[in-house]
Image (cartoon, helix red, strand yellow):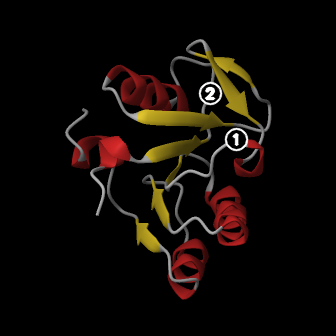
Amino acid sequence: MKPMKEKLIAVVGVSSKEDKFGYKIFKSLLDAGYLVEGVNPADGQVCGRTVFRSLKDMPRRPELVITVVPARVTERVVEECKELGIGEIWMQPGSESDQAVSRAKAYGMNVTFNACFMIHQGVW
């Protein structure tokens, strides 16, 4: 299994607002040297990087998706991951729902929830 720092990670829910977790997670991962792309339907730029409207719009498929969005949005992200063949999703605390977790598991994805990626990886 590849170390996390070698995986292409998509953070879904990136924000240009510095007080939001979507911004803090994205910036901290960039600063820590992770291969990371941002996803937000508003697209644009965050931290000088292009933000994609959806996972489908990314030029390369991520190996891991981190959700920093409301649970109902995570449920849609799980479906998008299934369509794209993305096999790993990390639902940040507050972005998970029983439905999102059970669907991801049913689709054979490696799913993590009830744990903060940043703390687990020692970034924060």
Q: Position of residue 121 (x, y in %)?
A: 24, 45
Quadrant of the rendered structure where residue 59 is? top right
Question: Which residue is nearer to you in this view: 12 or 93?
Answer: 12
Q: Is residue 122 left or right of residue 5?
A: left
Residue type at mark 2: give it: Ser
- For the point 60% across and 12% down, which residue is it? 48
Q: Is residue 101 left or right of residue 72?
A: left
The extreme bottom residue here reads: 106
- Give above or below for 48 relative to 57: above
* Cα distance between the residues tagged 2 and 1: 20 Å
- Give above or below for 19 relative to 5: above
Look at the numbered discs 2 and 1 and tell me whether their residues touch, using CB distance below 8 Å.
Answer: no
- Give above or below for 47 relative to 118: above
Q: Which residue is mark 2?
A: 15
Helix, strand or loop status at disc 2: loop
Quadrant where the N terminus is found in the figure: bottom left
Q: Position of residue 99 (x, y in %)?
A: 60, 78
Q: Which residue is mark 1?
A: 59
- For the point 66% across and 72% down, which residue is it? 82
Residue type at mark 1: give it: Pro
Q: Position of residue 96 (x, y in %)?
A: 52, 63
Helix, strand or loop status at disc 1: loop
- For the point 27% across and 51% down, which residue is it? 3
